Image (cartoon, rainbow, N blue to C red):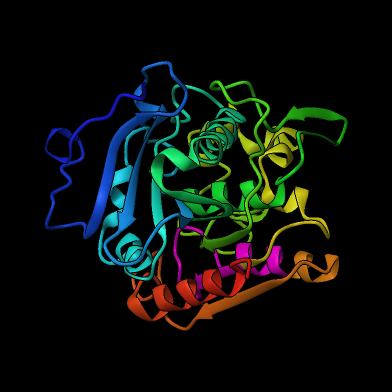
Amino acid sequence: MIAVRSLAQSPENYTESAIEASKSWIDLDYAGDGIIGHRMDIFLPKKGKGPFPVVVMVYGSAFFSNSSKGNCFKENYGQTLLKNGFAVVAINHRSSREAIWPAQIHDLKAALRFVRANASQFFLDNSFIGITGFSSGGHLSAMAGVTSGTKSENINGLEIDLEGNIGKYLETSSHVDAVVDWFGPTDFLIMDACGSSFSHDDAKSPESTLIGGAIQENKDKAALANPISYVSAGNPPFLIFHGNKDPLVPHCQSEKLYEKMQKAGVNSQLVIIEGGGHGPGVMIDKYYNQMVGFFKSKLKK
């Protein structure tokens, strides 16, 4: 039996009026270990008949939060997907202050396995599982895409386990079918050189905290956490959004990822938004609708 909370009991203050869903499950424990960072919420559209195609959503927090899944419903971000027939799965993951990389991708892969393994119970169509996230959530969404189907990798002589052993469904696939990345970092080592407003090279930066040491002093470890390190021809389709005035994650991050994907032959699109910041001017209805169109175009006929 899978334990759930009602909307009224949720620590993230969801309300029935705020989220237009026909049915929801709040605070599902996708790892079975009781920790906050391993909870997810599932919402079904009000219209249409299930099973519904799925989009997993990952919040941004500079990797510092283990409990911000509710942010996936700020503005119209998650709501636009629900209104267009997608089930939405908003997930927590462990913060970098409680577990360093690759704990976060292990959590994400465990959540994907849980969704796929339990799809029928929640009226989900596991023939399509897309993923999207913003900022650090964009990084994790991109990582899920570029490592889709890859259990381990060796980069610069360092081995990394990309699946982990979180949860009960270790034999279930964590594959994703399409990715929408909203201004996620992709190559930590060049962020400062690209014009960030603060030092990512600093030992206390989000990226340094994530890998457990200053990134420029741990370049091989940083490479293990860079989505750009894993780009290959077998990656699923990508849609990438980035504002050209983003002060926190320079837009070169998305441009470099896109360039590498194009060279590898990955089905990918890049939208650079004139005047867009780190969310403002980027996370708006115009681009939410483009995200929906992208996901719909990738549904299996």
Left/right placement of residue 116 relative to residue 230 reads left
Return the residue nearer the eye: 188 or 238.
Answer: 238
Q: Is residue 159 left or right of residue 135?
A: right
Residue 257 colored in magenta in the image = yes
In percent of the image, x 34 and y 25: which residue is there?
36
Q: Position of residue 147 (x, y in %)?
A: 71, 45
Q: Residue at x 45, y 21 (%)?
A: 98
Classify residue 238 by image quadrant: bottom right
Q: Residue furthest top?
A: 33
Residue drawn at x 40%, y 55% is 87
Q: Position of residue 124 (x, y in %)?
A: 46, 49
Task: Let me know if residue 231 appears in the view.
Answer: yes
| Tally of numbered tags | 0
Q: Residue at x 40, y 42 (%)?
A: 122
Query: For the magenta stretch, what is the residue range?
Result: 239-258
Left or right of 127: which side holds 86? left
Q: Is residue 160 above or below residue 17?
A: above
* Residue 213 is inside the magenta segment: no
Q: In this view of the protein, can residue 134 be seen by the observer?
A: no
Quarter of the picture holding the N terminus: top left
Q: In the orientation shown, which residue stands out farthest toward the right? A: 157
Q: Position of residue 240 (x, y in %)?
A: 57, 68
Residue 150, above or below 35: below
Q: Please, is residue 53 above or below residue 112 in the view?
A: below
Q: Give the quarter of the figure containing the C terminus.
A: bottom right
Of 221 and 231, the residue lying toward us: 231
Residue 190: name its quadrant: bottom right
Q: Position of residue 16 (x, y in %)?
A: 13, 52
